[in-house]
Amino acid sequence: MNQKDYFMQMRQLFDRESSTYTYLLWDKYSREAVIIDPVLEQSKRDIKLIEELDLVLGYALETHIHADHITGGGLLRERFGCHVAVHQNCEVACADVWLKQDDKIRFGEHTLQVLHTPGHTNTDISYLAADRVFSGDALLIRGSGRTDFQSGDAGQAYDSITQKLFALPDEFPVYPAHDYNGITSTTIGEEKRCNPRLNNNQTRDGYIRIMNSMNLEKPKKIDLAVPGNQRCGMAGSEGMINQAGESST
């Protein structure tokens, strides 16, 4: 059997309204799968794809408590019996698994290692695979997650990026939770060289000054999204669930 047959299978999916990337990952032979950052309004799409590919969904993984969309994790759990997993700082009673640094998520022959990468919020996780990293909002393409609300801390964000993510090889592919310019991925080396918040040997104090001066508007859905995600996208979100069920295929 060719070694490339063992490579992890992946689909990168997109929610246009929140510019969120969802990642469906699976083992080619066992069909065991996980999904990272599912979006409630896209649940019909995700369910259809999982069933068409004949996958066994084991986990719905969150990179953090989102402020811009409600998770589809709870709805996927109802459909497939998967586990909803969040970082232990989330204090989300509806979850099944509370993750911490260096925990392992296994599906078939593949493993995701949990990297706690706080700063955008104190709940942020990146998921490290053998050949790529899913960075959530911690590290974006030519940017990084804002740190001005919801337990954000710019100094902590700088430490997470420089000490954990930038410790990976330069050629390592990075798949973020969002992009607003139509770019699908980057690499560690690209972000070291080209990220305007982090390049040119940016200091920790300099990064903090940049993040504290951004003056961004409040996320439009934060008042709905945060409590919705604290319920895994279920109780109290019936209207959103109905909308998800009516979304186009």
Image (spheres, rainbow, N blue to C red):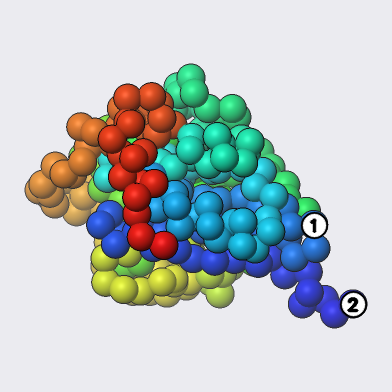
Image coordinates for residue 182, horizontal then vertical, percent? 31, 73
Residue at 69% x, 59% y is 54
Answer with the quarter of the image where residue 49 lies.
bottom right
Q: Amino acid at mark 1?
A: Ser
Residue at 19% x, 54% y is 210
Label 2 Cα neighbours within 10 Å, binned few <14 / some 14-19 / many ≥20: few
Q: Is residue 189 left or right of residue 137?
A: right
Image coordinates for residue 144, horizontal then vertical, percent? 32, 56
Q: From what the image shows, is residue 120 above or below residue 161?
A: above
Image coordinates for residue 42, horizontal then vertical, percent? 40, 53
Image coordinates for residue 4, horizontal then vertical, percent? 77, 77
Residue 220 seen by the camera: yes
Q: From what the image shows, is residue 168 above or below residue 158?
A: below
Nearer-the-camera pick, 197 or 176:
176
Residue at 41% x, 62% y is 249
Q: Which residue is mark 2?
A: 1
Residue at 44% x, 49% y is 43
Q: Amino acid at mark 2?
A: Met
Can you say which quadrant of the picture contains the N terminus?
bottom right
Label 1 Cα neighbours within 10 Å, binned few <14 / some 14-19 / many ≥20: few
Extreme bottom residue here? 2
Q: CA distance from mark 1 to mark 2?
A: 15 Å
Q: Is residue 160 left or right of residue 171?
A: left
Q: From what the image shows, is residue 109 above or below residue 241?
A: below
Extreme right residue here? 1
- Mark 1 and mark 2 lie on one chain; the one further toward the N terminus is 2
Q: Which mark is residue 30?
A: 1
Q: From what the image shows, is residue 134 above or below residue 77?
A: below
Residue 199 seen by the camera: no
Q: Secondary structure at mark 2?
A: loop
